[in-house]
Image (cartoon, rainbow, N blue to C red):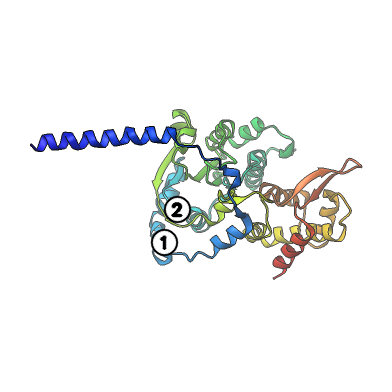
């Protein structure tokens, strides 16, 4: 009897399912469209999101603090040529930055924010090569004089330099820290292959994080086991993706300027005081010369050097690279042929941003 009851119940369920499908076909289709949804302004939505009260802060801080006991293991793995890859739910930015600032004091560290929409990998390689070159100059032997400027070299030449031999006296290493190596600015195949080649260089060590569930599909077997040579670490932090999330559009918000005053202010706060001062010089020039197409790079360098903010063009270029990567500054060609810098914000928005910088 029980089997008969079960069969009748399953039959009834199946019959109702197909009857529902038939009735759905005969009904009228909705004329509503996604474009008719009344979405809120992105800045208003981000303001509401920022007001959400954080939860479990003490537990998250305690969890992140517990990983400090692994720092020595991670340094050991780096010294022996492994790449340290961190994965797990939650932002790992704070964890990696703490590891770099406390345990990697013997290394020169270059940081790349892969969660940005675009990353200039050539500039990253140039910065790494310059760091290694400065270390080699300190060595009593093995110095090649008359070094060609790195910014004129090809990517292959830069990688060949980073993969050069070590001196007998001391290893010359630079550590590349990449937040979100699976981020939108680094996700394409060509970029990943270049990163793998850089990671395999003798003068380079790499620490990175991933968050996308399909991130391992970016690499083939050679990249994983030979070039990156990953040592995987499951370090869930459950920390919110506050910084990383700024650079991704919100689904529930309608279009607008991607770089608002609030997001620009948060980005500037993450930069060095010198970088903030350089940005302020450019902003003040743009506000005082609203009719100009932008500020020539040479003029910016002269103004910053007079204020003792930069000592060389190389230093200024490193700041400008950060600004461009964060989309704080853009370049356009002046009518006389010069490249000019400008901040893609309205006058009112720029005035608010400068006021926030001065606070």
Q: Quadrant of residue 333?
A: top right
Image quarter (top left, top right, bottom left or bottom right) of the N terminus? top left
Q: Position of residue 284 (x, y in %)?
A: 81, 61
Q: Is residue 115 left or right of residue 275?
A: left
Q: Residue furthest left?
A: 1
Q: Position of residue 133 (x, y in %)?
A: 65, 43
Q: Which mark is residue 195?
A: none
The residue that appears at 88% across and 52% down in the rendered structure is: 292
Count the labels in the image. 2
Q: Which mark is residue 60?
A: 1
Name the one closer to the observer, 329 or 174: 329
Image quarter (top left, top right, bottom left or bottom right) of the C terminus? bottom right
Name the one closer to the observer, 226 or 322: 322
> How dense is the environment of label 2, judged by Cα within 10 Å: few (below 14), some, or many (20 and up)?
some
Name the one closer to the observer, 309 or 187: 187
Query: Are the residues tagged 2 and 1 within 8 Å (C-beta)?
Result: yes
Circle 1 sits in a helix, a strand or a loop, which is it? helix
Between the C-alphas of marks 2 and 1, the distance is: 10 Å
The residue carrying mark 2 is: 90
Q: Position of residue 48 (x, y in %)?
A: 56, 62
> How dense is the environment of label 1, judged by Cα within 10 Å: few (below 14), some, or many (20 and up)?
some
Q: Is residue 95 left or right of residue 234?
A: right
Circle 2 sits in a helix, a strand or a loop, which is it? loop
55 relative to 235, above or below: below
Q: Is residue 194 left or right of residue 5?
A: right
Q: Quadrant of residue 339?
A: top right
52 relative to 245, above or below: below
Q: Quadrant of residue 355?
A: bottom right
Pick whichever of labels 2 and 1 is earlier in the sequence: 1
Q: Residue furthest right?
A: 336
């Amino acid at each position: 009897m029980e089997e008969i009851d079960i069969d009748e119940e399953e039959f009834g369920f199946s019959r109702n399912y197909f009857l529902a499908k038939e009735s759905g076909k005969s009904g009228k289709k909705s004329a509503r469209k996604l474009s008719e949804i009344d979405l809120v302004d992105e800045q208003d939505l981000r303001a509401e999101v920022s007001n959400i009260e954080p939860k479990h802060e003490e537990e998250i801080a305690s969890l992140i603090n517990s990983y400090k006991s692994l720092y020595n293991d991670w340094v050991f793995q780096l010294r022996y040529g492994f790449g340290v890859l961190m994965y797990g739910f939650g932002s790992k930015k704070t964890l990696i930055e703490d590891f770099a600032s406390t345990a990697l004091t013997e290394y020169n560290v270059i940081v790349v924010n892969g969660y940005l929409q675009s990353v200039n990998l050539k500039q990253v390689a140039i910065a790494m090569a310059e760091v290694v070159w400065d270390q080699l100059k300190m060595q009593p032997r093995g110095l090649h004089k008359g070094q060609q400027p790195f910014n004129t070299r090809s990517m292959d030449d830069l990688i060949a330099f980073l993969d050069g031999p070590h001196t007998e006296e001391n290893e010359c290493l630079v550590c590349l820290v990449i937040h979100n190596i699976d981020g939108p600015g680094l996700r394409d195949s060509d970029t990943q292959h270049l990163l793998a080649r850089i990671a395999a260089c003798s003068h380079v060590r790499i620490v990175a994080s991933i968050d996308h569930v399909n991130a391992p599909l970016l690499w083939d077997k050679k990249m994983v086991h030979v070039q990156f040579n990953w040592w995987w670490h499951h370090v869930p932090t459950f920390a919110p993706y506050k910084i990383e999330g700024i650079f991704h559009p919100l689904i529930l918000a309608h279009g607008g300027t991607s770089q608002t005053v609030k997001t620009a202010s948060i980005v500037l706060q993450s930069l060095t005081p010198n970088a903030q001062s350089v940005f302020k010089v450019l902003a003040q020039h743009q506000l005082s010369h609203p009719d100009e197409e932008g500020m020539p790079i040479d003029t910016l360098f002269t103004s910053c050097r007079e204020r003792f903010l930069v000592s060389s063009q190389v230093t200024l270029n490193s700041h400008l690279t950060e600004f461009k990567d964060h989309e704080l500054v853009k370049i356009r060609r002046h009518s006389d042929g010069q490249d000019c810098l400008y901040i893609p914000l309205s006058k009112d928005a720029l005035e608010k941003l400068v006021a926030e910088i001065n606070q």
